[in-house]
Amino acid sequence: MRQKNLVIFDSEISYAKRLMEKISGRREVSFRVYVFTEMEKLEQFSKKQGVDYLLIDEACSKTVREGVGARRILLLSKNEEKENEEGITCIFKYQSVDKIVEMILEGCKSSASGGILRKKREGAGRVLAVYSPIHRIGKTRFAIELGKKLAKEAPTLYMNLEEYAGRNLPKGEAQQGLSELLYYAKQENSNLGIRLGSMVYPRGALDCVAPMLIAQDIRAVTEEEWLDLFRQILEQSIYETIILDIGESIQGIYGILKMCQTVYTPYIETQPEKAKLSQYVENLHTLGLESILEHTIQKQMKEGR
């Protein structure tokens, strides 16, 4: 089956190439992106390969647009208030690149021809947690390294749910993060999978979501909101595995651990820390939550990490 394509036609070559690079860099995109600035070359391409989605400057006449024979047309407009035309999605040209890409993907996704986003393997989708009652033993480092390893096999997303996670983002990377993701998850028809693609930043093959800035905000999220967020990510995005780096402050911590397929619990072999781990295990037994222990893997860490 021929891979679908998106063709960008714009006289501003640097603008068009920047869009192409941004779209092509999204892990969830399954089509190829081409850029043209000369109509003759675009028409030749159309006759030879066909055009599935055409993103074109509004300065081009309707006759020219229709002559390409694209299955779906998206119009780049300099008018912020321009409304969609029949069968055509209008996109304001001078806004953030991430927002433009979201609108392009949403416009293409609504097309009957579909096929713009990668699909998971059938039946894939799991949530793993890294949690320990023992602190400062390299839990976050372990969670990230686990995520990087799993990301080599399938798309994997790392989420830090600690109260003070730090926000050490690579320069120029995702400005939006976990707070915004929770907000979008509450909205109907939010296309969470598409929005998520513009929020993540990479650590090698592993994708990460920026943690919350305000500690009080993460304490206010309910267990139901967390579980609904994880469900939507697995249903609407490309990610087959979610790695949760869990702290003490979130609501419904036991409910989340119970939902996870596997819980990794780092520990060290010193007497005070072993006592903490023992108390945690006893608590689970007392609360009737032995099922968490049944899918828990205890991971011994090196002391001093």
Image (cartoon, rainbow, N blue to C red):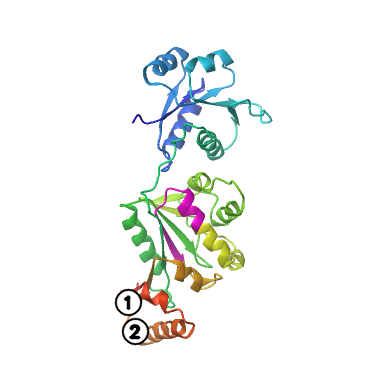
Q: Where residue 249 sits: x, y (%)?
A: 54, 72
Residue 116 falls left or right of residue 304: right
Identify the image quadrant of the C terminus: bottom left
- Of 101 and 5, the residue lying toward us: 5
- Of 50 and 299, the residue lying toward us: 50
Identify the image quadrant of the N terminus: top left
Residue range in magenta is 231-245
Give above or below for 53 relative to 39.
Answer: below
Give above or below for 286 relative to 168.
Answer: below
Q: What amino acid is found at the position of numbered circle 2 in the picture?
A: Thr
| Tag 2 near tag 1, CB within 8 Å | yes
Check if residue 238 falls in the magenta segment: yes
Give above or below for 276 relative to 207.
Answer: below
Look at the numbered disc 2 and give the secondary structure of its residue: loop
Residue 61 visible (yes or no): no
Q: Where residue 275 sits: x, y (%)?
A: 40, 87
> Which residue has dot 2 on it?
270
Image mark for residue 105: none
